[in-house]
Image (spheres, rainbow, N blue to C red):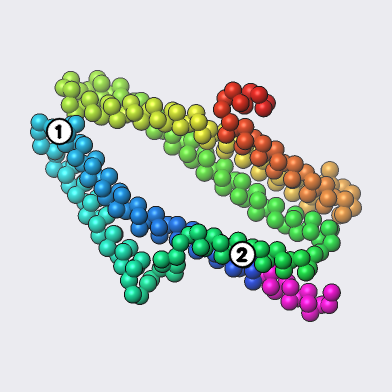
Amino acid sequence: MSSSNSENTTDALIEYRRQVADLKQRIKNRRLQVWGFYGTPIIFVVTIFVWSALKVFIWLHGDIPSAVNGLFGGILFALAVSIVPQVGMEFGDETHWKDARTPVKELKLELELTEEARILEARKLTPPALERQASYKERVPGEIARLRKESRHYRRIHLFMQWLLFVSSAGVSAITAWYDPPQPGKGVLIILGFTVTVVTAAAGYFKPRERAFNLQQTADSMEQHNTALELGIAPYTQADKVSLELFATTVEELRMEQRKREQQLDQPHQGQQGVI
């Protein structure tokens, strides 16, 4: 393969990567647009329903406090104001959204075709195994950063659930001791009790604490091996070819173990015992 053909193929691969990154961002933006376009009216209707439910179940024989009316009125006004520009940007003559009236499914298909074209182009320039392993080593820090990011995400979810449980449980006791009349304390107690039940069930089902721990553990192990390879210490004290091969094998084993732990967390408790 000539040098000019190799450079052309490399430039084409870089361009395909840019197109793939752009399409992924466009899909993400379009999903947000669709969510806002269809979700805002739904939230508007749900807000009216909640406002009416508060009147029926809590303040049936009295007037709703002005602060509550003002809160719901402000929310409805903000939602109504946001609906108008979204409709204009979606169906107006001069569209301000890049992919207005474009289904997400169509963007996904374009992404798949671009990925396929990138793979076909990459076949024209297949580097030796040593170069691929060196390139893989350069991608590992990004994978470590991704694992740490997901770990922080699940850790925040776990902390949020715990604080929600703490506040709701304390609120149940406080309101029970504070309110002698049945209303509005009874309605608040129902909401807090419901919150405690839902959060407890969600924490037990999704296990955000365990997911955060597993992701952090995998990221730490991968970082340890990456540092050992860069410093040339055990177990990467041999030639570069052997060390890169061992490094790639070790990292893939760590990733496989992480996927197995994720699968175990997704299974019911009885299923986990069988797998372990």
In the visual, does 275 lie left or right of 174?
right
Relative depth, front residue between 197 and 169: 197
Residue at 74% from the left image edge and 49% from the top image edge: 226
**Which quarter of the picture shows residue 69?**
top left
Q: Position of residue 196 (x, y in %)?
A: 38, 28
Residue that badge 1 annotates: 59
Q: Position of residue 100 (x, y in %)?
A: 41, 67
Q: Is residue 258 visible?
A: yes
**Which quarter of the picture shows residue 23?**
bottom right
For badge 2, the amino acid type reads Leu
Question: Which residues, given as a range, are shown in magenta?
Answer: 1-14
For badge 1, the amino acid type reads Trp
16 versus 32 height, above or below: below
Q: Position of residue 78 (x, y in %)?
A: 25, 55
In the visual, does 97 lie left or right of 233?
left
Q: Position of residue 200 (x, y in %)?
A: 44, 28
Rendered image: mark on residue 175: none
Q: Main secondary structure of the magenta part?
A: helix
Residue at 78% from the left image edge and 44% from the top image edge: 250
Residue that badge 2 annotates: 113
Relative depth, front residue between 260 and 237: 260
208 versus 130 height, above or below: above
Q: Is residue 220 visible?
A: no
